[in-house]
Amino acid sequence: MKLYEGNMYWPTTKKSIKYDSLNENIDTDIAIIGAGMSGILCGYELAKRGHEVVLVEAEEIAKGSSSANTGLLQYSSDKMLYEFIDEIGKENAVLFYRMCHEAMKDLKALSERLPERGDFVTRKSLYLASKIEDITKLKKEYKALLENDFPVEYIDSKALETDYGIKGTEALLTKEDAEVNPYKFILEISEEAVRLGLDIFENSKVLDIDKSDDCFIIKTKDGSIKAKKLVYATGYKANDYSEIKDGEINRTYALATEPISGDSWKDRCLIWETARPYFYARMTEDNRIILGGEDEEKGSVTNSEEKLQKNTLKLLEKLTKLFPHIETKIEYSWNAVFGESDDGIPFIGQDTDDKDVYCCLGFGGNGTVYSMAGSKIIADLIEGKSNKYAHIVSLDRQG
């Protein structure tokens, strides 16, 4: 499955890092397949804890869904906290949101170890009611977040117009969210992980996996890995373990504008909305605007230039409607696929058939945050430790 199509912005911001392909037979404790955000974060966490880990990637690191990621990081989920409370109960719902909030803090701490921080910048998020009827939803969400000690403010229509220049609606303002350059972030983490002992092999597509004498034999074209534990971090490419369980694959669109002159909007906060599919916006280090949305229930990317142009122009029109003072043009545009679980919660943990296999699946639009949480959960499970979040995201959860 092709994960993206178009002219992407992030790979232009940093020179790629080259790793050797696998051309020998090696033994290790843990093998990870996939060098996107989830694979690199798992590799980093396990290497940091002193494990012997080998990571293999079919192509180049950070070149899959992760480089199509728009880099908005939030503790809030696409499904509101009060909705989760109604569906899975208050205890688990609040615990899930706390998992994401904790992951945000962990991502910030990790960024501080990196030379360029992966362009990680703490931001506020402005969550707009897309229509008048959604204001009731925002007020319910505000109450749920506030009662459970999440950092949030309510912005009424007067304050929203005065402070942000947005008319005719209301919003939530969540704090301790962030923006990141996902491509740069992965590359910088990979260097830190290698320093800690992680072995990375690029251009080493896995051709076959056997299990014998409690060990996996992972074969590539020119080599093999013998490992006691196996972590699948292959995103949304179809194979026995990375098909989305109880979920679906969707298509999304994104763009990066030319650098703008003058002001954008207050505090350069992240912007998203209650509509589904939703529109979202952020700024970059070099003063571009990243826009995303126009999601479709399609299981593959499109290579139609006409369709890509049509949908990204819709995104630019939405920006102009929000902020008429901003004049800019599209410089980069792309579309990508993402997987999403039916219940809005990712699948992270041990495979239901083989307890030596671990998976990271169904990340929806919050993949970096879930990948950070997932790296801790998987490392704890491999070490036989309890993790207070593991049952919520487990592959065999009830619901």
Image (tube, grey):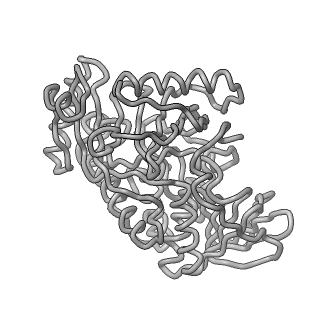
Q: Name above or below for residue 101 compared with residue 87.
A: below
In the displayed structure, does residue 16 sit left or right of residue 355?
right
- Between 372 and 362, which is closer to the camera in this rendering? 372
Q: In which quarter of the image is residue 384?
A: bottom left
Q: Which residue is drawn at 67% across and 78% down?
A: 28
In the picture provided, is 55 more to the left or to the right than 252? right
Spot occupied by residue 281 in the image (x, y as percentages of width and height): 41, 37
Give the residue at the far right of this rendering: 222
Q: In which quarter of the image is the C terminus?
A: top left
Q: Is residue 387 left or right of residue 207?
A: left
Q: Quadrant of the N terminus?
A: top right
Is residue 291 toward the left or the right of residue 134 in the image? right
Name which residue lies at 20% across and 49% down. 151
Residue 356: % across, % down: 59, 65
The residue nearer to you, when weighing 263 against 106, is 263
One can see residue 394 in this view: no
Give how far across and how far down residue 32 sits, in percent: 63, 65
- Going 17% across and 34% down the picture, which residue do you hit? 155
Q: Where is residue 21 in the image (x, y as percent from the top left)?
A: 78, 68
Q: Is residue 367 visible?
A: yes
Q: Quadrant of residue 103?
A: bottom left
Mark count: 0
Q: Which residue shows up at 56% across the image and 55% down it?
A: 183
> Does residue 367 lie above or below 218 as drawn?
above
- Vertical arrangement, residue 13 with respect to residue 344, above or below: below
Q: Nearer the viewer, residue 335 or 235?
A: 335
